[in-house]
Structure formats: structure tokens, C-alpha cells
Image (spheres, grey):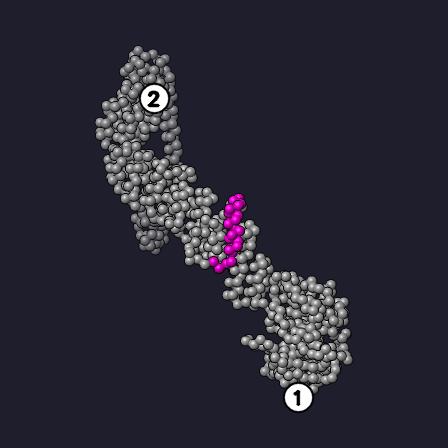
């Protein structure tokens, strides 16, 4: 494997003559800080001093020969007491850690097959440790308290089988027998069976992981993690058969076989490294790794710093493993270091997905990792020029950038997908802290990107709103791609209103071509209507109105209410644009509700002028309709002035309205009947002129119209129709006086029948109304009579409800609740 969690170094080689090879071979190790102890086959304990920083070689210290035979089985250093405990010849002996001399007062503990030392975590200040030993003669485990110059047995725990391996964590003891694993509580002596196994004594593994957890060689070649409560909180490891030893160096588990050492991760239970070690016999955990020994050699496997491990995984593009490892060792890293490293790995993971076209995942990872957007922008040819020269990339992506350039040159379809990702990423990151730090580069890159993708909607949204696009960089790009409308919007968003409108005017005048622009003229009008720069408005007003008077006038009429241009200035300017003037006057009167006589006069006269000009055109009816409505409804124009303009024209309906406004109703009807020759309009005139007036006025108008009809033989039929359609209005006695003697009864019979019926109906309705009124009066009389017959008791000292003074007069009033009051106080009563 390319990844290395541990670095192997050769620490020590034992030199010996060939004859002594078998007798002096290494059997066990112990290490404390720089002190390394070797137990040999020939009952010797050797003290080695590991090199300090700046030194290169290990130094040999003292050696102590314990006897002539039997190997040293176990060594345990107790730095608190400066003791080195040695298991040799089935006895535990205490030596001084430095002189290797026996400790006075600590006699051998005999008949011991195994032992372990642990910190009891006592609350007292007494310097002591605890030790657990397994008897070689009895099925019993003893607990010893070990002091500087004494030790004693404090407890015995009986066992059903002889222990073959021990591991201690606090008050919990894990015991392996020949066929099962047990958990024992040292304080209470209780035990709990975990699970059976079928390993030989050589392959039984029981070691403490820390924090109340043990690692055991379970059935089926499984490394089992068991808590002191008896449950498993981690999944098991599938490790090799014939494991000689196992050790924990967080977050790794190291397993030893005769020819190889395997490194497994506790995070994902996968094997990460294999180290070849011929003839390995055992291993020992140290503060920064493990020591592995053969009969003659000692090798150190030092844990590579986590940051270097993670970086190595990232370089191998095993980023998921890198993130898992980082999360697994979070508790061992400073919080600031962890956060920065996590961000870096998250971003690098994003790059892996990015180059695999996993864009959605890549975007989320880049954002979560707070990646500088310029790291992405710099990968894109043509767009990378948006980045300033002072930017220094923190990532090694040069080769990948070349790969993306190849895609750009050879596979435009795939590169198009990469461009889409860039747009999504920059849009998402634009409002974040990282995006704001380089907002100028982000906006410039987005502009180039939208131009490249022909994404007009997003381009226009970018340039139309406040942005940090560099004009120096972006203007040439927009000009090169004929995106002149967007160029004008860019100028406008940067406060260059004149340049913006100039650019749009060139599009409207076909000087510039922009296929992405539809209604540039409408946009210019809207922009000028919102522009606060009055000089700019007047500068382009002539051009705007020359293009279209009815739309162009909106630069004055659509302005915000708090920023309108002086009305008289606008009217003076619009004198040469009659259609615009007309629209503006309509705006003043109908929208702003102007009551200025001159405005109403000008609008009416403008309508007249337009109507006269349109006499031969199809839309004359629309203009005359507006004019007539203005003449009927407006109360603020000078009737005489308008009439003088109309009386010599063919606008007869308008003359009639004006004559009516001067109370010349008969003359108005004469105009409609004889000049306009529109009898329907004449009758409609009577209805319109009588609106808001009494019925007598309408009858007078209709009688006048009837007289006009009767004065001409050509209008006899119209007169009959007028009578028959207004039987309710005409009074029969007045009509009879006007009818010619030559008319027959049959000709006007329909009118008289209808009039008679209407008269009869009105008379009956009047009687009915009178009867209803009499009934209502009778009801009020009954209520009054009932109220007047009610008795009231007036006692001495009775108070008025309103003024609270005595009722001393015979006259008094009573409210609906029966409360009495002075008659003069009734006006102040609330009841």
C-alpha cells in the first residue's frame, strides 16, 4: 500500500556470539519515556536509553543477571515508584528502574504466572499502585497494593479456570482462559462470561483499549471490542488467523503475525498498512506508536502525524478516508487546527467530485469547506483572467487545471457542463463571507460565464443590480460579443447613466446590433422616467419623443410622485409634439386631478385639433368620444373659449354639448337635428343633459325636441316614435296642445293608451302610499296611547336621573327604562 500510518525504523540490534544466540534472545520489552528495558531468554534484564532530540544512537545502560536459567516473561515499569517489576522463574521481583538493583523490603512474590499493574485512582496522597497476579498453583487472582518499599495482598478472587492472559482498566479486569473470556470486577469480585474462543494459548489476545474498553481475539478471527459493561460499541475487525499480539495506537489497531504486522483503522475497520517483519515475536505500545521485537532486533513503528496522514490520503485521492480519519481523531486535535484541516480536506474532496463531474456534491463540499472561489475560477481558461495577479493559490491543482484546459479544447460539450457548475457555485457562494472577500472577481467571472453560455436572463440580472464588475475587464467582453443592452445596464449599475442611455440609443438607432434585446426603446423610456438626473432627462427627451410621442411622453408622466418635473416646463417643451402634449394633459387631469382651467382648456382644444385632423381617419370616433366626455364632465374649462373654436367646424355634437353648457338647450337640439342629422343623438342628448336634474327638466327638453320634430314634415315619424318611447315622461295635456290638427287619433293612440295607464298607475301608487302612511301614523298613536296610560310613582325626595336634584314640580319625563327626570334634562339623557 502507498499510504503509511506508521514509519518503521530499526531501533536496536543485539550483538552476540553464535553460540549464545539461543540463550540471549529477546523475550519481552518494557518502555517508559526514554527508558527501554529488555528481558532475555537467559534471565537477563537490560536497560537501554533511547536517543533524545539531536542524538542518533541508542545507548546501553546497566544489565542485571537474575539467575542462570529461565527466561524473563514480563516487564512492567512503575515510574511513580521508580520500580521495574520483573516476572521470572514464576516470581515477581521489584528492581530499581535505573540501577536495576533489587528494591529493599519488596520480597519476591512467588508462584505467579501472569501479572498486570494499574493505577487505582485513589483520592489519597499515598504513592502506591495496584497489581493483579495470577497464581501458578491455584485457580485464583490476587490484588496487591504496591508501595515504595512494601506490597501486600488485599483481595483474592477465585477462578474456575487458570488465566492465560490479563488486561486491566480501572476496577475492571478482563481475563482470558483456555476457552473463554471473562470480565471481573476487582472491587466486588463478581464476574461475567463474555464469549468462548478456540485459540491456543499463544494466540489469545486481551489488551486494554482505554476508557473502559478491551480488545479481544474472538471466534472466527474477529477482533472484538468489548466495554467493561459487557457490550460492544464498535463493529469487530476481520483480522488474520494466528495473531500473536495486538496493540492499540489510536485510531489504529496493530496485529502481529510471525512474518508481518497489519495496521487496521478503528474508524472504518479497514486494513491501511502492512509491514514485513520476519521472525517477529511480540509488540509493545508506546506513547507515539509501537515497538516490535524479534529474537535479536527491535523495530519502532512511529505514528505519522495525523495531518500528514490526511494529506497523504488526499494526494492518493482517498478523500473519503481522509475525512473519516479526520473526524475519528477530532478529539486528539486542537479545535482550530481541526477546523482548518477539515475545511481543507472538505475542499479537496470537492475537487475529486468536481473532476468526476459530481457537480452537486462538489458544490456543497466547496461551500462547506469555505473554499476561496478564486481557486475554482483559476481553473477555467478565458475566465481565469478575472483574478488579480496578487492572488496566490493555496492548493496544488496545476495538473488538474491543465486537464480542464484539454477538455476546453477537445470536448466542448463536457466543458459546457463545467461552465454550468461554475455558474451554480459562484451564484451560491456570492453572498457568503468567502464570496464577499473577492466579490469583484466573482462578479467578473459570472459576467464572462453568462456571456459564454448566452444566458441572457442571468446576465441581465447581474448587470442590472448593484455589482462589483470591473468596467475595465467587462466592457470589452460585452462589446466583443455584441451584448450592448447588458453593457448599458452595466454602465447604469455603476452610476454612468449618460453612457448607459447612449449605448441603448445606439441599439434603437440600429448602430449597434444586439440579438438578445427586444424592447430597448421601452427600457430607455422607463429609465428616463425614473432618472433623478434632470439634465440627462432633457438631454434625451427630444430623441425619445421623436421616436414615439405617445410612449415617449411617459418620461414625464411616469415619474415618481416626489420627483416630478415642473408642469409648465413640460407643457412648453411638448408644444412641438401634439400627441405627447395631449397624453400629458390627460395625465394631468385624469391622474393628477388638476383643476387648472388652462389645463382643461388646452386638453379640450387639443382634442378639437386632433379630431379635425383625423376627419378622414378611422380612429376619429375614439378622439371625439374623449372630447365629448371632456366637454360633458369637466367643470373647469372655459365654455366660451372652446365654443369659439368649435362653432365654425363640423363637430356638431360637440357644439350641442357646449350650447347646453351655456343653457342654450333648444339651439343645441336644433344643431343635432338639422346639422348633425342624428335623431338618436338628439334623444340621447336629452337624457345626458338631464342627468342630476329633476323630471320636469327632462320633460321640458323632450317637449322642445318634440316641437322641433313637429315643425318639419320630414320628422313626423320621429315625433311619433319619441312620444311612444317616453309615455312616462310626457304629460298628455301638454302633448295635445302641440299636436297638429291633421293628426288622426289612430296615429297617437299608442301614446295616449300608455300615458293613461301611467297616469292611472301613478294615481293608485299615490293612494297606496297614503294608506301606508296612515297605517304608520295609527301605529305611533297606539304606542303613544299605551305610554300615556302608564302609572308612575313619585315619592318625596325622588331624584332626577340626570341632574340628581329633587323632582319638586308636577311635570316630569320618563325614559324607556322607567327612570324619572326633569323635562329640562331630557336633552342631556343618554338613554
Question: What is the x, y in percent for residue 483?
Answer: 41, 42
In this rendering, position of residue 336 left or right of residue 771: right
Instruction: Identify the secondary structure beneath mark 2.
Output: helix
Q: Residue at x 61, y 61 (%)?
A: 2
- Please tell me which residue is depicted at 40% across the width and 41% down the height of the picture: 482
> Which secondary structure is most common in the magenta stretch?
helix
Marks 1/2 in contact by CB < 8 Å: the verdict is no
Q: Is residue 227 visible?
A: no
Q: Which residue corresponds to the image point at 57% horizontal and 62% vertical from the top-left?
A: 312
Residue that numbered label 1 is attached to: 104
- Tell me where residue 196 sits by quadrant: bottom right
Instruction: Quadrant for residue 58, please give it.
Output: bottom right
| The furthest residue to the front | 18
**Is the residue marked by circle 1 packed among few (<14), some (14-19), or many (20+) residues within 10 Å?**
few
Task: Please state the total of marks drawn on the protein image.
Answer: 2
Q: Which residues are magenta?
A: 393-413
Return the x and y of residue 252 as percentages of the image width and height: 63, 66
Instruction: Rate crowding at label 2 as few (under 14), some (14 to 19) or many (20 or more) other CA atoms within 10 Å.
Output: few
Indicate whether residue 397 is drawn in magenta: yes
Which residue in the structure is indicated by mark 2? 680
Dot 1: what SS? Answer: loop
Residue at x 65% of width, y 74% of height = 298
Asked if residue 758 is among those painted magenta in the image, a careful observer would answer: no
Amino acid at each position: 500500500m502507498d499510504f503509511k500510518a506508521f514509519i518503521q525504523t530499526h531501533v536496536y540490534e543485539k550483538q552476540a556470539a553464535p553460540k549464545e544466540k539461543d540463550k540471549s534472545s529477546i523475550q519481552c520489552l518494557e518502555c517508559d519515556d526514554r527508558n527501554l528495558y529488555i528481558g532475555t531468554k537467559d534471565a537477563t534484564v537490560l536497560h537501554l536509553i533511547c536517543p533524545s532530540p539531536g542524538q542518533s544512537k541508542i545507548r546501553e545502560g546497566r544489565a542485571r543477571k537474575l539467575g542462570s536459567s529461565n527466561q524473563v516473561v514480563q516487564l512492567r515499569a512503575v515510574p511513580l515508584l521508580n520500580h521495574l517489576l520483573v516476572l521470572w522463574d514464576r516470581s515477581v521481583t521489584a528492581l530499581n528502574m535505573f540501577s536495576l538493583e533489587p528494591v529493599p523490603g519488596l520480597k519476591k512474590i512467588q508462584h505467579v504466572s501472569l501479572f498486570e499493574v494499574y493505577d487505582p485512582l485513589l483520592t489519597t496522597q499515598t504513592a502506591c499502585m495496584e497489581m493483579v497476579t495470577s497464581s501458578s498453583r491455584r485457580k485464583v487472582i490476587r490484588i496487591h497494593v504496591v508501595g515504595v518499599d512494601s506490597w501486600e495482598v488485599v483481595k483474592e478472587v477465585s477462578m474456575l479456570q487458570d488465566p492465560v492472559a490479563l488486561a486491566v482498566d480501572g476496577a475492571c479486569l478482563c481475563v482470558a482462559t483456555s476457552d473463554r473470556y471473562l470480565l471481573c470486577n476487582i472491587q466486588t469480585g463478581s464476574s461475567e462470561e463474555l464469549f468462548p474462543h478456540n485459540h491456543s494459548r499463544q494466540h489469545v489476545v486481551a489488551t486494554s483499549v482505554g476508557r473502559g474498553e478491551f480488545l479481544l481475539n474472538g471466534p472466527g478471527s474477529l477482533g472484538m471490542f468489548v466495554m467493561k459493561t459487557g457490550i460492544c460499541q464498535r463493529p469487530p475487525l476481520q483480522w488474520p488467523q494466528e495473531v500473536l499480539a495486538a496493540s492499540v495506537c489510536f485510531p489504529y489497531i496493530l496485529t502481529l503475525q510471525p512474518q508481518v504486522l497489519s495496521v487496521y483503522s478503528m474508524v472504518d475497520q479497514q486494513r491501511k498498512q502492512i509491514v514485513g517483519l520476519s521472525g517477529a515475536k511480540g509488540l509493545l505500545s508506546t506513547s507515539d506508536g509501537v515497538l516490535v521485537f524479534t529474537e535479536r532486533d527491535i523495530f519502532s513503528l512511529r505514528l505519522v502525524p495525523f495531518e500528514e496522514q490526511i494529506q497523504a490520503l488526499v494526494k492518493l485521492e482517498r478523500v473519503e478516508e481522509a475525512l473519516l480519519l479526520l473526524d475519528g481523531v477530532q478529539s486528539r486535535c486542537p479545535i482550530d487546527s481541526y477546523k482548518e484541516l477539515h475545511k481543507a480536506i472538505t475542499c479537496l474532496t470537492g475537487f475529486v467530485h468536481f473532476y468526476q463531474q459530481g457537480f452537486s456534491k462538489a458544490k456543497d463540499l466547496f461551500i462547506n469547506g469555505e473554499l476561496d472561489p478564486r481557486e475554482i475560477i483559476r481553473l477555467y481558461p478565458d475566465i481565469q483572467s478575472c483574478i488579480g495577479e496578487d492572488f496566490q493559490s493555496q492548493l496544488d491543482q496545476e495538473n488538474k487545471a491543465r486537464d480542464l484546459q484539454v477538455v476546453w479544447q477537445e470536448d466542448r460539450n463536457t466543458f459546457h457542463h463545467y461552465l454550468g457548475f461554475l455558474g451554480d457555485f459562484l451564484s451560491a457562494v456570492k453572498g457568503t463571507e468567502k464570496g464577499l472577500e473577492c466579490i469583484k472577481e466573482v462578479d467578473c467571472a459570472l459576467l464572462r460565464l453568462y456571456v459564454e453560455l448566452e444566458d441572457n436572463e442571468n446576465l441581465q440580472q447581474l448587470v442590472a443590480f448593484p455589482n462589483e464588475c470591473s468596467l475595465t475587464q467587462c466592457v470589452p467582453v460585452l462589446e466583443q460579443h455584441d451584448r450592448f443592452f447588458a453593457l448599458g445596464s452595466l454602465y447604469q449599475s455603476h452610476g454612468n447613466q449618460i453612457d448607459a442611455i447612449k449605448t441603448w440609443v445606439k441599439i434603437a438607432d440600429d448602430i449597434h446590433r444586439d440579438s438578445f434585446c427586444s424592447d430597448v426603446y421601452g427600457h430607455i423610456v422607463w429609465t428616463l422616467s425614473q432618472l433623478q438626473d434632470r439634465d440627462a432627462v432633457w438631454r434625451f427627451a427630444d430623441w425619445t419623443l421623436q421616436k414615439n410621442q405617445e410612449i415617449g411622453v411617459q418620461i414625464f408622466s411616469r415619474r415618481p410622485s416626489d420627483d416630478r418635473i415642473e408642469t409648465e416646463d413640460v407643457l412648453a417643451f411638448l408644444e412641438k409634439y401634439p400627441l405627447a402634449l395631449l397624453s400629458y394633459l390627460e395625465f394631468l387631469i385624469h391622474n393628477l386631478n388638476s383643476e387648472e382651467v388652462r389645463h382643461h382648456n388646452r386638453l379640450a382644444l387639443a382634442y378639437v385639433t386632433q379630431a379635425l385632423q383625423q376627419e378622414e381617419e378611422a380612429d376619429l370616433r375614439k378622439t371625439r368620444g374623449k372630447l365629448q366626455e371632456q366637454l360633458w364632465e369637466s367643470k373647469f374649462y372655459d365654455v366660451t373659449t372652446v365654443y369659439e373654436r368649435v362653432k365654425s367646424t363640423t363637430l356638431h355634437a360637440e357644439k350641442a354639448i357646449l350650447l347646453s353648457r351655456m343653457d342654450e338647450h333648444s339651439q343645441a337640439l336644433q344643431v343635432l337635428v338639422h346639422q348633425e342629422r342624428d335623431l338618436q343623438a338628439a334623444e340621447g342628448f336629452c337624457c345626458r343633459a338631464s342627468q342630476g336634474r329633476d323630471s320636469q327638466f327632462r320633460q321640458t327638453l323632450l317637449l322642445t325636441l318634440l316641437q322641433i320634430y313637429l315643425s318639419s314634415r320630414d320628422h313626423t315619424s320621429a315625433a311619433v316614435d319619441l312620444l311612444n318611447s317616453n309615455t312616462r315622461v310626457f304629460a298628455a295635456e301638454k302633448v295635445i296642445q302641440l299636436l297638429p290638427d291633421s293628426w288622426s287619433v289612430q296615429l297617437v293612440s299608442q301614446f295616449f293608451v300608455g300615458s293613461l295607464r301611467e297616469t292611472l298607475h301613478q294615481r293608485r301608487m299615490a293612494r297606496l302610499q297614503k294608506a301606508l302612511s296612515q297605517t304608520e301614523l295609527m301605529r305611533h298613536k297606539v304606542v303613544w296611547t299605551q305610554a300615556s296610560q302608564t302609572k308612575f310613582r313619585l315619592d318625596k325626595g325622588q331624584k332626577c336621573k340626570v341632574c340628581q336634584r329633587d323632582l319638586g314640580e308636577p311635570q316630569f319625563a320618563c325614559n324607556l327604562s322607567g327612570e324619572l327626570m326633569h323635562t329640562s334634562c331630557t336633552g342631556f339623557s343618554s338613554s
